[in-house]
């Protein structure tokens, strides 16, 4: 029974050492990622594009997986603390330190995931706003040219008996109506601040 207990303690110690080394590697990588994420954040709003958007989505997927792994490690370290045999104080502190590290890694992964998500949502909002402005300008142009096209189409028909064709100044009146319509619509849209 002492041999089993000793063997169990050695395997727990080995598992703890391996997890401790892994947590250091993960922590260094996550801290390095924080710096690259800050650079990406600055670059994203200045020169944002599809390449950076794909990169952020890739980061989000990786961070989901990492956070899941860190959560597993948090549960394992918590389980090790509960099932610890003996009163070895240094081992207890080591397990507590290990648990705290994986909790920190889990919270960092979650925080970085939210940052990436916020950046993507911000970029999509800005792109949507730009698209709305473009569509608004196209709508104004269409609204100005539709009545003009209608009048041009109406008077471009080849009928022999159109009453306005017999009037000497009908051409100039039609041009005046078209110009007045254009100026009126543009003034209305400017008053509404549509462009």
Image: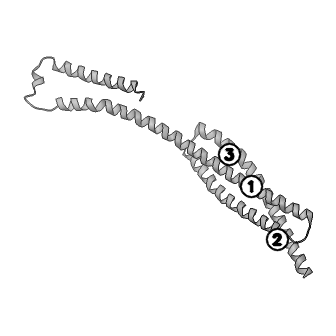
- What is the CA distance from the residue labelled 2 to the residue labelled 3? 39 Å
Left or right, 13 with respect to 38, comes to right
Whether 5 is drawn above or below 93: the answer is below
Q: Mark 2 or mark 1: which is in front?
A: 2
Tag on residue 105? 1
Whether 152 is drawn above or below 50: the answer is above
- What is the CA distance from the residue labelled 3 to the residue labelled 1? 16 Å
Residue reaching furthest to the bottom: 1
Tag on residue 37? 3
Residue 78 x %, y %: 78, 64
Left or right, 5 with respect to 124, comes to right
Q: Earlier in the sequence, mark 2 or mark 3?
A: 3
Residue 188 x %, y %: 35, 25
Residue reaching furthest to the top: 169
Q: Residue at x 60, y 38 (%)?
A: 45
> Which residue, given by chain and number where applicable, does mark 2 sit on?
83
User: What SS does tag 1 mark?
Assistant: helix
């Amino acid at each position: 029974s002492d041999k089993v207990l000793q063997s169990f303690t050695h395997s727990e110690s080995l598992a703890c050492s391996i997890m401790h080394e892994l947590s250091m590697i993960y922590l260094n990588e996550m801290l390095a990622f924080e710096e690259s994420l800050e650079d990406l954040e600055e670059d994203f709003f200045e020169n944002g594009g599809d390449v950076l958007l794909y990169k952020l989505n890739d980061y989000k997927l990786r961070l989901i997986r990492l956070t899941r792994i860190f959560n597993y490690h948090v549960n394992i370290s918590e389980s090790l603390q509960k099932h610890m045999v003996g009163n070895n104080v240094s081992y207890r502190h080591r397990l507590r330190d290990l648990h705290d590290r994986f909790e920190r890694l889990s919270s960092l992964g979650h925080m970085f995931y939210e940052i990436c998500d916020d950046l993507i949502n911000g970029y999509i909002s800005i792109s949507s706003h730009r698209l709305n402005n473009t569509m608004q300008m196209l709508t104004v142009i269409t609204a100005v040219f539709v009545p003009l096209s209608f009048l041009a189409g109406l008077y471009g028909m080849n009928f022999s008996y159109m009453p306005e064709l017999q009037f000497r100044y009908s051409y100039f009146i039609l041009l005046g109506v078209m110009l007045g319509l254009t100026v009126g619509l543009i003034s209305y849209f400017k008053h509404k601040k549509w462009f």
